[in-house]
Amino acid sequence: MSPGPAAPPGRVLLDRDAISAAVARVAREIEADFPDGVVLVGVLKGALLFCADLVRALRGTEVLVDFLAISRYAPDSGRVRIVLDVALDLAGRDVVIVEDLVDTGLTAAFLVRHVERLGARRVEVCTLLDKPARRILPVTPRYVGAEVPDVFVLGAGLHLHDRYRNLPVVLEVDRAAVAAGLRPGADRGPGGTIEAESEATA
Ligand code: IMP
Ligand code: MG
């Protein structure tokens, strides 16, 4: 199946059916673990689409939804800053952090600590994609849609300079070639260097 006319050249790693099946399976796993309710905390902007799919698929338990947004100072720097925090009171709650992709694990580890500090009783990580080959911190997402090799991917919420989040599939691309095809200046965030979820990987 073609990823669509606006897609850059690449190889489809997960098509729509594979994404739907992964969402359904992960939803059943979360329901089984949290029959008394769960708070999903989606990490903007990358997890927006996966989180929406997951929320729709969760029917067997009470679900609360919140979001946070982060900014990374430089790829793999481990320096993550919260630019939008959760609004719900997480004290004593069971929380699942919803990510698009866990790569080095630096972001997920930071967010788990953050949610623990907000008083959550239990914190787990759910990710659409897991790229264990590049892990720096020992983060083990309890719920994984699919494992991917050490390649650059776009679509299903994942972006390059904020483009291509809307691709309905997960596409493996040549990052440099795609970047070269973007408008000059497309890589500048509003502040010049810091952009929410700016540089995904080096
Ligand atoms: P890390 O685990 O702290 O290294 O950061 C993971 C984040 O980097 C993910 O949540 C994505 O937003 C982004 N990221 C990692 N790999 C890719 C990729 O292949 N394509 C697009 N974004 C990526
Ligand atoms: Mg992310």
Image (spheres, helix red, strand yellow):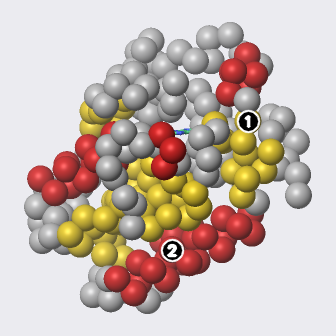
Report the disc number at residue 173: 1
Secondary structure of residue under mark 2: helix
- Rendered residue at 61%/70% (across/down): 22
Residues at circles 1 and 2 in contact by the CB criterion of under 8 Å: no
Q: Is residue 98 left or right of residue 111?
A: right
- Image position, residue 94 (x, y; %): 23, 72
Pick the quarter of the image with the N terminus.
bottom right
First in sequence: mark 1 vs mark 2 = 2
- Image position, residue 49 (x, y; %): 56, 56
Q: Is residue 73 left or right of residue 12?
A: left
Q: Is residue 25 above or below residue 164?
A: below
Secondary structure of residue under mark 1: strand
Q: Residues within 10 Å of mark 1 (few under 14, many from 20)?
A: some
Instruction: Name the residue tied to disc 2.
Output: 26
Q: Is residue 189 above or below residue 79?
A: above
Q: Amino acid at mark 2?
A: Val
Q: Residues within 10 Å of mark 2 (few under 14, many from 20)?
A: many
Q: Is residue 179 above or below residue 106?
A: above
Q: Residue furthest front?
A: 133
- Rendered residue at 44%/53% (across/down): 99
- Rendered residue at 48%/49% (across/down): 132
Q: Amino acid at mark 1?
A: Val
Along the line of sight, the residue nearer the viewer: 81 or 201: 201
User: Quadrant of residue 9 in the image?
Assistant: top right
**Residue 48 visible in the displayed image:** no
- Rendered residue at 63%/37% (across/down): 152
- Image position, residue 184 (x, y; %): 68, 10
- Image position, residue 176 (x, y; %): 69, 21
In three-dimensional space, the C-alpha distance between marks 1 and 2, rounded to whole angstroms, equals 26 Å
